[in-house]
């Protein structure tokens, strides 16, 4: 069954009549894949997820989860999805165990079933030792794991993760990725997630859509997207003071050569295959290679290519984005 | 392929789960519980005990009464009437006045307040006050639920939307009832005089009256809080209206002694009806027709306000 689990067509959300948070977004997610929405803060990721999980009504367009319309069959959607929100929503004054049981109650799961599942889930996310401690004593990573466990109590077929590793340190982040992968396999789920971490999208997602200012800019397999940029970059320097551009250009699969202060930037289809040919050709012509480096394009290059901005830059020069994000947040809260 | 989730949430299950969550939070925090009781306790202790209105009518408060040594009285007032003027002793005359004043004190108190001690009167008023503030404030927890993302999470589950709203109302009501019980208990320790007609059955009436006002007030405040993103707004609003609501009612002072315009306000103020019902059921000799009027008004208030409040909240949640 490789049907499309999530289908969005022209999904749009306008806040306060003029703030377009999500702008005619269309995509589909296939069974069993981890689909990621990648974009800077305020790009419309959370708004999209909130429409898919039936918390927000779309202004325009339609979306369905497992064939159920998110507006007309909202209750059916709610029963088959699990949600792990961006915030830590577990009740701090209750214990981890009590929180999971509470989630179970909200899904109408009989207590004897939810008790069994809670024990199992706590084991899975390695919180068994802390299950009777109040959540206020938990660390960020533990809370995230608890949120994951809560989101799984109804054995969802589709799991929605909103910025699953937001604010976690690198180690905890990697651990959380492993949990997500394992849980996905264990429960045979389809996962829809949002992130603004490039590494996360790259390592975790089978397919991603890059979203910016409410629009999907490009979508696809992260590897494909990177390859679509036109392959790798070889940077090379030689001992001799000579122009070797023509020699390099004559090599197979070389797309572009640029001389940058004595070192050459060569754009090629595949760095691994072409680099030996370059060295070979230069040696044949009597040149000595002193340095060679090989860089593969990152998702940041993909983002740069399509938006004209670097995502890392936008993360660092936060001002405009913070303002935009605040507006959206406020509108969302209203 | 995992099977489709076969469970359906029910309104009652969801309602209970969400209510228990809040009560647990609250009961886990004895300091907060204490703080909420302390305020009416201070009112009761300071105002109730210091404003010893009954003691106003005592002979010692009359001060020096300037009475001449001999008081002339026309003979026609004397029994049997005689002619001319007779004289009575001034000391005796002032003794009579003092005795009379001491005697009418309790009568005046009983006519105005229904009881002879102000403390009993205002302790019951304090129960109304705590019911009012508790129900108003507990609606505010929804602001937190929203800001912390809990509300969105709950909204993404299939729990009936009604359970979310009713859980807040129910939680407010249960809190108000518990606190009223504590205040009543404390007041009894400090000298509240229950009327001879009081039976344990009356307690049920007390809870019923509190329930009606709580449901009405908390629904309205929920609808109000659910729309505000910050706590400041509902908090300011509450502190703005609690004072006038309390004074424009019989919580602290009888309506009959108020100026007309204030009486008009006090007669639509639901707090007056709750307070009267509570007094009828505890410290006064029960007047059935008045009690029935109180309950009819409280019931009407609860029905109208809760339907407005719940409708508005519902609309907000399904936006």
Image: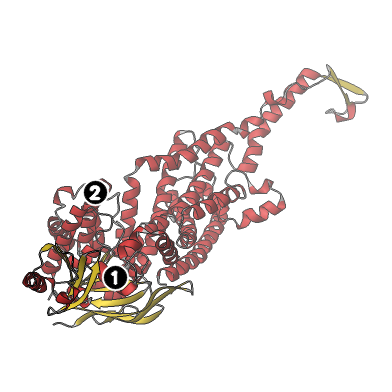
> What residue is drawn where x is 28% and y is 55%?
A167
Residue receiving disc 2: A139
Which sits in the foreground, A89 or B289? A89
Which sits in the foreground, A115 or A15? A15
Is residue B135 shown above or below B44? Answer: below
Where in the figure is residue B219, as x and y percent of width and height?
46, 61
Q: CA separation, marks 2 and 1? A: 33 Å
Residue receiving disc 1: A303
- The residue most toward the right is B84
- Looking at the rendered structure, the number of numbered marks drawn on it comes to 2
Where in the figure is residue B6, as x and y percent of width and height?
19, 73
Which sits in the foreground, B159 or B177? B159
Is residue B188 shown above or below A89? Answer: above
Query: Of circles 2 and 1, which is in front?
Result: 1
> What residue is drawn where x is 31% and y is 66%?
A310
Q: Quadrant of the N terminus of chain B?
A: bottom left
């Amino acid at each position: 069954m490789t049907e499309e689990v999530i289908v969005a067509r022209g999904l749009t959300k306008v806040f306060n009549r003029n703030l377009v948070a999500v702008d005619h977004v269309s995509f589909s997610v296939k069974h069993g894949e981890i689909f990621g929405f990648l974009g800077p803060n305020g790009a419309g990721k959370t708004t999209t997820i909130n429409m898919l999980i039936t918390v927000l009504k779309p202004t325009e367009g339609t979306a369905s989860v497992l064939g159920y319309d998110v507006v007309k069959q909202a209750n059916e959607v709610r029963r088959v999805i699990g949600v792990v929100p961006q915030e830590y929503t577990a009740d701090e004054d209750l214990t981890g165990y009590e929180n999971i049981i509470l989630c179970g109650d909200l899904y109408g799961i009989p207590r004897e079933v939810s008790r069994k599942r809670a024990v199992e889930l706590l084991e899975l996310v390695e919180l068994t030792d802390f299950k009777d401690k109040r959540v206020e004593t938990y660390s960020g990573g533990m809370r995230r794991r608890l949120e994951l466990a809560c989101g799984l109590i109804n054995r969802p077929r589709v799991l929605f993760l909103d910025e699953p590793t937001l604010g976690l340190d690198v180690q905890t982040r990697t651990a959380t990725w492993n949990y997500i992968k394992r849980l996905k396999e264990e429960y045979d789920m389809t996962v829809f997630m949002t992130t603004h971490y490039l590494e996360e999208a790259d390592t975790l997602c089978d397919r991603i859509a890059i979203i910016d200012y409410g629009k999907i800019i490009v979508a696809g397999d992260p590897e494909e997207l990177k390859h679509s940029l036109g392959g790798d970059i070889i940077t090379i320097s030689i001992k001799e003071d000579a122009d070797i551009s023509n020699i390099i250009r004559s090599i197979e699969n070389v797309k572009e050569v640029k001389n940058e202060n004595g070192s050459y930037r060569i754009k090629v289809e595949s760095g691994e295959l072409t680099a030996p040919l370059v060295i070979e050709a230069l040696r044949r012509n009597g040149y000595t290679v002193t340095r060679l480096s090989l860089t593969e394009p990152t998702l940041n290059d993909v983002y740069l290519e399509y938006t004209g901005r670097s995502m890392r830059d936008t993360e660092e020069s936060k001002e405009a984005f913070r303002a935009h994000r605040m507006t959206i947040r406020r509108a969302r809260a209203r | 392929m995992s099977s489709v989730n076969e469970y359906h949430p029910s309104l009652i299950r969801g309602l209970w789960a969400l209510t228990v969550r809040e009560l647990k939070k609250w009961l886990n925090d004895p300091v907060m519980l204490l703080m909420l009781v302390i305020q009416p306790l201070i009112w009761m202790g300071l105002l109730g005990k210091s404003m010893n209105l009954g003691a106003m009518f005592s002979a010692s408060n009359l001060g020096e009464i300037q009475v001449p040594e001999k008081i002339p009285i026309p003979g026609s007032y004397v029994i049997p009437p005689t002619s001319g003027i007779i004289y009575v002793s001034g000391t005796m005359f002032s003794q009579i006045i003092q005795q009379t004043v001491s005697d009418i004190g309790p009568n005046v108190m009983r006519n105005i307040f229904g009881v002879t001690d102000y403390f009993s009167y205002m302790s019951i008023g304090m129960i109304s006050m705590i019911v009012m503030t508790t129900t108003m404030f507990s609606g505010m927890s929804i602001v937190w639920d929203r800001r912390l993302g809990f509300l969105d999470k709950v909204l993404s589950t299939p729990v009936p939307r009604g359970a979310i709203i009713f859980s807040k109302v129910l939680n407010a009501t249960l809190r108000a009832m518990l606190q009223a019980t504590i205040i009543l208990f404390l007041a009894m320790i400090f000298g509240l005089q229950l009327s001879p007609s009081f039976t344990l059955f009356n307690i049920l009436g007390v809870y019923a009256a509190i329930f009606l006002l709580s449901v009405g007030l908390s629904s309205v405040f929920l609808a109000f809080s659910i729309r505000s993103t910050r706590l400041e707004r509902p908090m300011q609003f509450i502190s703005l209206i609690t004072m006038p609501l309390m004074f424009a009612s019989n919580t602290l002072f009888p309506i009959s002694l108020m100026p007309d315009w204030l009486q008009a306000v006090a007669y639509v103020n639901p707090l007056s009806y709750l307070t009267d019902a509570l007094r009828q059921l505890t410290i006064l000799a029960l007047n059935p027709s008045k009690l029935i009027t109180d309950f009819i008004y409280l019931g009407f208030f609860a029905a109208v306000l809760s339907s407005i409040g719940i409708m508005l909240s519902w609309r907000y949640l399904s936006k």
